């Protein structure tokens, strides 16, 4: 109780300063140390970047455990860490629903996608989708959907970086935040340019360990304050918030029939989106065999599952020790729950560590997305479509490196433009686009013998187009209080997540396009893909240096 | 490697008749074992997940029923989602190790021995 009392006393002080908690200098120093250490590691890792397989797939030399940790690093973005802890702290149980969707989704990857994909592809998602279909149209479509998903995800992370600094570094004005976004972007370009997939993977491994360790320590701390009893913790959260409803669903999504349907749509996008995220799929190529790909997913599931259990404790912990009012009043709003909790528990030092980890998170996720987008452009569009395969791998890697710079600059610009946008919305959007545009084609081409080029093209463009169109016509873009465009109202579609319409539509279009097509695909290729996907025959092995 | 970054493996398929392999008893058994596990399991966890989501979405009072102290049915069902995810993961790994990997490895070795030239790793294996 004394904690709550002293917390209440500290409120006026903080709102008066209204810029940051803890010491910005300490936050920056810890973050600087992280950047310095990872840069050295990236430089060391980059010595062996010779071939395309080295640059895109880290020579396929990572173990399942390493890759699984890197996947967790890739997946647990700042939106999951800050966003979910904040959502639980404010909306209680409804925040918990996010983490369940994000975790269960990994079973789709484990059971249906990871190993088969590792066995049939080489560098990108398009390798698998175009394996037995017509190269050109399918590859272009897959590259476009890859770039679209990466772009939305990148915007979310960069916008998140801007919001985070306002809280942690005391930089409140737009110019200062833009400067920080630029610094994050330039650092990320350096990592990816120098380190390739190997360097990026190491950054993700380090970041995942720091993030999970940090969350673990805070979780134990919060539990210790409540006698290691979940019921006591929930009781304290109910007491601070004065609302018993925070331990059961409905606070956020139970408001009306529309919000309930919206939640259903979100749940669908979350569970089906993960196994179709291009930057997650590309990670499966960094291991030598399908068995290691399986091991990667198993590691990822344990780490991600444990992490989301921590966020449950941290969210209710923030709710109990800090209280929803103080969190929403803080400069970073909902996203500030985790940093505020760190400050409450361990003062400036723990806050500095957690802030540095949050920054590192953004940096690592952005790097992973950038290398995926660059590989897709260089490998699928430049090498295979523009040059029709008549390019040597060195030339392809050169193009990939240039693409990294272009994407880096674009995401800096986009991040500056997207400042103040809802980060969780942009991430959920990326999941919905991935689930609509990619998942039907991935599943059909792996499991449905008759599937053909027309089905793939219809499904990918139909899924991508309908998802983006529905978002443009949703209250997220216009007509609502928190819309991007406040002056106009063209929100014909009532839900903010398009998944419930666009995902079934993409599956339907894939089927319809296939049955209406008169040109059959090469049965030899289908047989080859099926045999390869299940046996791993001829799959690329690790390169040894 | 050569000048075909598009092809998964250089010269793939030329020396091996994959349609023939696809028809062999051994391969059909592998495919059957794989699908008879992953399909029902995928249907099961998706149904269980959506049952949970629908309860959380439309049965607030039921989910708010207290069980022990402040822990209610909603919290328990949510934690059970974690538990089933972990259990299915371990179950699949043990199934794959026992029932899928041996037969896949056997087929792979047979194919690679029958036509080694078709399966030389083009990207870096020869380095």
Image (spheres, rainbow, N blue to C red):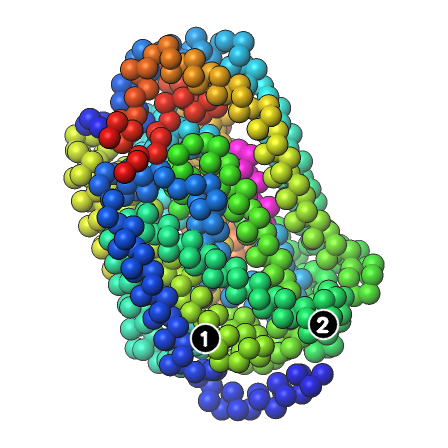
Q: Is residue A356 magenta?
A: no
Which residue is located at x 38 percent, y 13 percent? Answer: B113
Main SS class of the magenta portion in the image: helix
Which residue is located at x 68 percent, y 47 percent? Answer: B83
- Local SS, label 1: helix
- Local SS, label 2: loop
Q: How many marks?
A: 2
* Residue A366: x %, y % from top left: 36, 57
The picture quadrant where one finds residue A259 is bottom right
Residue A444 visible in the displayed image: yes
Which residue is located at x 69 percent, y 86 percent? Answer: A2
Using the image as rendered, state which of residue B95 and residue A97 is in the foreground.
B95
The CA distance from mark 1 to mark 2 is: 24 Å
Residue A456 visible in the displayed image: no
* Residue A276: x %, y % from top left: 46, 42
Chain part drawn in magenta: A101-112
Which residue is located at x 73 percent, y 74 percent? Answer: A236
Residue matched to label 1: A352
Query: Of label 1 and label 2, which has the lower sequence position?
Result: 2
Residue A226's disc number:
2
Instruction: Answer few, some or many: residues within 10 Å of disc 1's Cα (few below 14, many 20 plus, some between 14 and 19).
Output: many
- Circles 1 and 2, Cβ within 8 Å, touching? The answer is no
Which chain is mark 1 on? A
* Residue A76: x %, y % from top left: 49, 56
> Where's the N terminus of chain A, which quadrant?
bottom right
């Amino acid at each position: 109780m004394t904690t709550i009392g002293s917390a209440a006393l500290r409120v006026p002080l903080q709102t008066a300063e209204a810029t940051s908690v803890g010491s910005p200098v300490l936050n920056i120093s810890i973050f600087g140390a992280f950047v310095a250490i990872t840069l050295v590691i990236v430089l060391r890792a980059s010595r062996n970047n010779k071939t395309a397989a080295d640059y895109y797939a880290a020579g396929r030399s990572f173990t399942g455990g390493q890759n699984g940790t890197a996947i967790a690093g890739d997946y647990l973005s700042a939106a999951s860490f800050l966003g979910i802890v904040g959502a639980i702290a404010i909306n209680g149980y409804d925040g918990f629903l996010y983490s369940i969707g994000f975790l269960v989704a990994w079973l789709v990857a484990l059971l249906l996608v990871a190993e088969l994909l590792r066995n049939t592809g080489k560098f990108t998602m398009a390798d698998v989708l175009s394996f037995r279909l017509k190269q050109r149209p399918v590859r272009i479509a897959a590259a476009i959907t890859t770039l679209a998903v990466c772009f939305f995800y990148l915007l979310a992370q960069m916008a998140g970086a801007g919001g985070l600094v306002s809280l942690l570094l005391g930089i409140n004005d737009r110019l200062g935040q833009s400067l920080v976004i630029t610094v994050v972007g330039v650092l990320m370009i350096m990592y990816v340019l120098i380190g390739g997939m190997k360097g990026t993977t190491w950054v993700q491994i380090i970041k995942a360990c720091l993030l999970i360790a940090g969350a673990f320590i805070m979780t134990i701390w919060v539990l210790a304050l409540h006698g290691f009893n979940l019921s006591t913790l929930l009781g304290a959260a109910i007491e601070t918030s004065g609302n018993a409803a925070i331990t059961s669903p409905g606070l956020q999504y139970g408001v009306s029939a529309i919000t309930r349907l919206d939640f259903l749509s979100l749940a669908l996008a979350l569970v089906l989106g993960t196994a179709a995220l291009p930057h997650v799929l590309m990670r499966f190529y960094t291991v030598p065999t399908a068995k290691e790909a399986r091991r990667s997913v198993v590691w990822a599931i344990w780490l991600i599952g444990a992490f989301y259990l921590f966020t449950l404790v941290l969210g209710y912990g923030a709710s109990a020790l800090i209280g929803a009012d103080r969190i929403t009043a803080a400069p970073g709003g909902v996203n500030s729950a985790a940093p505020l909790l760190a400050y409450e528990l361990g003062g400036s030092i723990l806050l500095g560590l957690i802030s540095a980890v949050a920054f590192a998170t953004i940096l690592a996720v952005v790097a992973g997305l950038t290398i995926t987008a660059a590989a897709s452009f260089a490998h699928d569009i430049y090498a295979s479509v523009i040059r029709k395969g008549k390019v040597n791998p060195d030339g392809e890697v050169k193009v990939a490196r240039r693409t990294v710079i272009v994407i880096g600059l674009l995401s800096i610009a986009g991040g500056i433009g997207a400042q103040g946008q809802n980060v969780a919305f942009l991430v959920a959007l990326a999941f919905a686009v991935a689930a609509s545009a990619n998942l039907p084609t991935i599943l059909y081409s792996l499991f449905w013998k008759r599937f053909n080029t027309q089905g793939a093209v219809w499904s990918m463009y139909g899924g991508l187009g309908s998802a983006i169109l529905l978002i443009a016509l949703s209250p997220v873009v216009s007509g609502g209080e928190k819309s991007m465009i406040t002056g106009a109202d063209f929100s014909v579609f009532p839900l903010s997540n398009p998944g419930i319409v666009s995902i079934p539509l993409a599956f339907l279009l894939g089927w319809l396009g296939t049955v209406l097509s008169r040109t059959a695909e090469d049965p030899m290729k289908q047989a080859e893909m099926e045999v390869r996907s299940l046996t791993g025959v001829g799959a690329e092995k690790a390169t040894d240096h | 490697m050569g000048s075909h970054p598009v092809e998964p493996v250089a010269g793939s398929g030329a020396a091996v008749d994959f349609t023939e392999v696809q028809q062999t008893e051994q391969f059909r058994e592998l495919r059957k074992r794989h699908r008879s596990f992953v399909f029902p399991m995928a249907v099961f966890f998706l149904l269980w997940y959506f049952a949970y989501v629908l309860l959380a979405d439309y049965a607030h009072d039921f989910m708010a029923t207290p069980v022990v102290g402040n822990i209610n049915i909603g919290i328990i069902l949510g934690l059970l989602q974690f538990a089933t995810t972990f259990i299915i993961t371990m179950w699949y790994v043990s199934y794959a190790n026992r029932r899928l990997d041996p037969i896949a490895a056997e087929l792979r070795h047979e194919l690679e021995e029958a036509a080694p030239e078709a399966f030389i790793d083009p990207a870096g294996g020869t380095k």
